[in-house]
Image: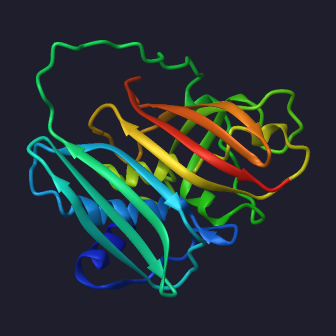
């Protein structure tokens, strides 16, 4: 089942089947559930001038591979900004909450850019894709990931963090315009930045995730994006990090921040 089919079901019926192949440990891939909530929220925006500015997600509980319900509520609809809350339900309980802010561009005397420039990586064609192994979470088979700097997770590296290329897997997704929910879902596929220093595999779980969109996304599912993560702090079983994402034209298009629980 493609994203388009899932989104169509969300539009047409109350309960939606979770497609196969998206498990991540004991839960469904957070990027997929986020995309489902974001799609439902986007359908409430009837002003074509308003685009997604930012979204934050709290992963309340594990979502199983069975039907879910997505609900939305407009918290406030202003002239420039609309704030919407979406929730995903399963087993009579809220399993995820998304807050999204949509806004139209406004004229301003403030015009400053201190963002990070895109790292210079070798081309994806000259590097090796992360091979999918049956012991890896199912969701990884839906994406092409390439490490361009830093170490792989659980390799006892001296330093955390990494960077590389990513996109939807050519073998599973057709070429076509990349929707905003699909783009947001894709951002969640990278493991936590702290994982390279681990000496052996250990479970981890995103607690909260915040994404700021700097530019409208104009890309195809086959286009490569660049990713680079930096860990601020990790102690007491939790890690906090931020990441930058550039499009195929080296435009910085998104900044993510998340808090991750590390079970080791």
**37 left or right of 159?**
left
- Report how many numbered discs are placed on residues in the image: 0
Judge left or right: residue 107 versus residue 144.
left
Report the front residue among 82 and 44: 82
Find residue 55 and report its horizontal and vertical position in percent.
38, 48
Q: Is residue 5 visible?
A: no
- Residue 229 coordinates in the image, percent (x, y): 61, 32
Front-lying residue, 8 or 143: 8
The residue depicted at 47 percent of the width and 63 percent of the height is: 32
Horizontal relation, residue 6 to residue 255: left or right: left
Q: Is residue 109 visible?
A: yes
Residue in front for this viewpoint, 168 or 66: 66
Q: Position of residue 110 (x, y in %)?
A: 22, 14
Residue at the image position 24 percent from the left and 13 percent from the top:
111
Residue 9 lies in quadrant: bottom left
Q: Quadrant of the N terminus?
A: bottom left
Q: Reply above or below: 200 against 72.
A: above
Q: Which residue is at 57% across, 44% downward?
A: 258
Q: Position of residue 22 (x, y in %)?
A: 56, 68
Q: Residue 139, relative to residue 165: is it above or below? A: below
Colour mapping: rainbow
């Amino acid at each position: 089942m493609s994203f388009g089919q899932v989104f169509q079901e969300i539009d047409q019926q109350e309960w939606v089947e979770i497609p196969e192949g998206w498990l991540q440990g004991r839960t469904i891939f957070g990027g997929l559930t986020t995309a489902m909530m974001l799609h439902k929220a986007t359908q409430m925006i009837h002003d074509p001038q308003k685009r997604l500015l930012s979204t934050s997600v709290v992963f309340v509980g594990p979502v199983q591979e069975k039907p879910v319900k997505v609900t939305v509520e407009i918290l406030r609809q202003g002239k420039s900004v609309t704030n919407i809350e979406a929730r995903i339900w399963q087993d009579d309980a809220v399993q995820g909450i998304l807050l999204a802010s949509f806004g139209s561009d406004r004229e301003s005397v403030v015009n400053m850019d201190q963002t990070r420039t895109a790292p210079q990586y070798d081309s994806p064609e000259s590097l090796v894709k992360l091979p999918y192994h049956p012991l890896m979470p199912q969701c990884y088979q839906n994406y092409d990931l390439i490490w361009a700097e830093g170490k792989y997770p659980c390799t006892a590296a001296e330093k955390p963090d990494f960077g590389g290329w990513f996109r939807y897997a050519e073998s599973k997704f057709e070429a076509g315009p990349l929707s905003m929910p699909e783009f947001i879902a894709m951002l969640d596929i990278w493991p936590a930045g702290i994982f390279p220093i681990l000496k052996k595999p250990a479970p981890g779980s995103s607690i909260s995730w915040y994404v700021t969109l700097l530019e409208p996304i104009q890309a195809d599912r086959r286009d490569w994006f660049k990713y680079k993560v930096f860990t601020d702090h990790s102690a007491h079983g939790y890690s906090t990090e931020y990441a930058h994402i550039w499009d195929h034209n080296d435009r910085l298009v998104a900044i993510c921040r998340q808090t991750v629980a590390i079970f080791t």
